[in-house]
Image (cartoon, grey):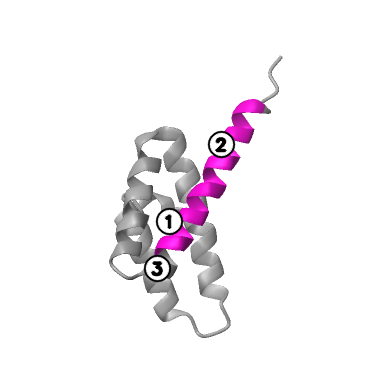
Amino acid sequence: MSEKFLRFDVKDYLKTPADLSAYIKGCEIEDSGDGRLNRVARRDVKHTIRARIESDPDFAQALRIEAATLIHSGEIEIGRRLLQLLQVALRHQTARRFFTYRR
């Protein structure tokens, strides 16, 4: 009997901005030192932010508030990373809106 596997997508499990920051923190702690896990986490979070902004426009504001809260509580590096990823996602969304070619 063959086994059936479901496709795992991390963006299905990262629902809130707090989940994103916890995921980045966890990957930072578990990284072996070569930075590979941090790069994967950054890519996953970037794709998650893009997908969430397209479906929920208020998510960007909630993520900005989460990043500001992290910076205020002393976790400056993680807050800065979230802000950078949000900026990249918003830039991507804006470019996509302006450069969508339709017939």
Q: Which residue is mark 3?
A: 76
Q: Give how far apart the Cα atoms at labels 1 and 3 are.
A: 24 Å
Q: Which region shows up in magenta? A: 79-98
Q: Secondary structure at mark 3?
A: helix
Residue closer to the observer: 68 or 10: 68
Q: Secondary structure at mark 2?
A: helix
Q: Quadrant of the C terminus?
A: top right
Could you tell whether 26 is left or right of 97 in the image?
Answer: left
Q: Which residue is mark 1?
A: 10
Is 8 one of the magenta-colored residues? no
Give the residue at x 46% y 35%.
54
Q: Amino acid at mark 3?
A: Ile
Could you tell whether 19 is left or right of 4 in the image?
Answer: left
Residue 57 rendering spot, x and y as whole percentages: 40, 33
Residue 100 position (above or below residue 44): above
Give the residue at x 59% y 41%.
92
Residue closer to the observer: 60 or 13: 60
